[in-house]
Image: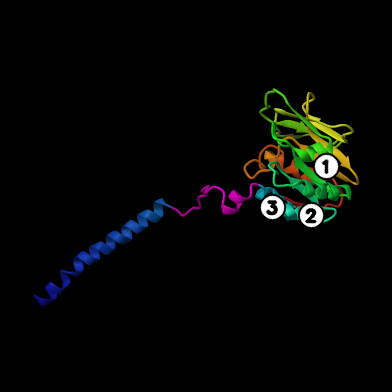
């Protein structure tokens, strides 16, 4: 009787172990481990800096990509660098604009976005660039823009409702009706003025030919080693 009583508690345990082994075998036969990519959205750094992807593109192509976090740093830009200056630059005072233009005149290369109307734009005023509103539809695949004579045409989304104009521009690009990109000579330096810069933002740089366009635009000047955003 004692041996029979000892065996009875082992039967449920053996049955449970069998069920566990059988369940595990069935699970392994019907399921496999795999990696699933989940879009978690932009991280904190990308939410703070809309040009982070552009900076990383420049760095990945071998350039020294820097971020300018305060307007007074415009006084200390290195010679021979490229400065990418988006719109909404009301914090740039008149003395800082003068220092920036002096830097360009010494040989700097400025890529500037025009302010949308009716916002004033003293920087473009100083460069002799005028703006006017136009009513034209936005093409679905952007505008075909060539940055040099005989160079490739790249599809880029630009602002359809803002036309740019300047005398003696080295390059004009748009849709044949209005110009949306101008390349100017200023002293020993150059200035590229665009009516839109959203193509270089984190959410758009991977679309159309935006990444290649930004790279070609930033490296128009030979020997560029540093890009400052």
Q: Residue pushed farthest left?
A: 1
Which structural element holds mark 2? Answer: helix
Of labels 1 and 3, the one closer to you: 1
The residue under label 3 is: 56
Q: Quick one: label 3, few (<14), some, or many (20+) residues within 10 Å?
A: some
**Residue 21 % position (x, y):** 32, 61
Q: What's the CA distance linking mark 1 and mark 3? A: 23 Å
Residue extent of the magenta highlight: 32-50
Of labels 2 and 3, the one closer to you: 2
**Residue 200 % position (x, y):** 69, 42
The residue under label 1 is: 191
Q: Nearer the viewer, residue 58 or 2?
A: 58
**49 is within the stretch colored magenta:** yes
Q: Is residue 29 above or below residue 190?
A: below
Q: What's the CA distance linking mark 2 and mark 3? A: 24 Å
The residue under label 2 is: 75
Q: Is residue 147 above or below residue 9?
A: above
């Amino acid at each position: 009787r004692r041996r029979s009583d000892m065996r009875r508690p082992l039967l449920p345990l053996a049955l449970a172990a069998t069920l566990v082994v059988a369940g595990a075998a069935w699970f392994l036969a019907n399921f496999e481990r795999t990696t699933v990519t989940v879009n978690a959205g932009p991280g904190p750094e990308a939410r703070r800096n809309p040009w982070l992807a552009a900076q990383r593109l420049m760095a990945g192509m071998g350039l020294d990509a820097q971020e300018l976090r305060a307007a007074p740093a415009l006084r200390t830009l290195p010679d021979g660098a490229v400065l990418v200056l988006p719109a909404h630059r009301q914090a740039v005072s008149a003395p800082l604009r003068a220092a920036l233009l002096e830097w360009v005149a010494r040989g700097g290369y400025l890529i500037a976005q025009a302010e949308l109307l009716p916002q004033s734009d003293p920087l473009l005023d100083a460069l002799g660039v005028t703006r006017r509103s136009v009513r034209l539809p936005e093409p679905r695949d952007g505008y075909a823009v060539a940055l040099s004579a005989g160079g490739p045409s790249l599809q880029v989304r630009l602002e359809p409702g803002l036309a740019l104009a300047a005398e003696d521009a080295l390059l004009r690009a748009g849709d044949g009706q209005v110009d949306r990109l101008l390349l100017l000579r200023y002293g020993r330096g150059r200035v590229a003025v665009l009516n839109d810069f959203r193509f270089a933002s984190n959410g758009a740089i991977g679309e159309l030919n935006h990444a290649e366009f930004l790279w070609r635009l930033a490296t128009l000047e030979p020997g560029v080693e540093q890009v400052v955003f």
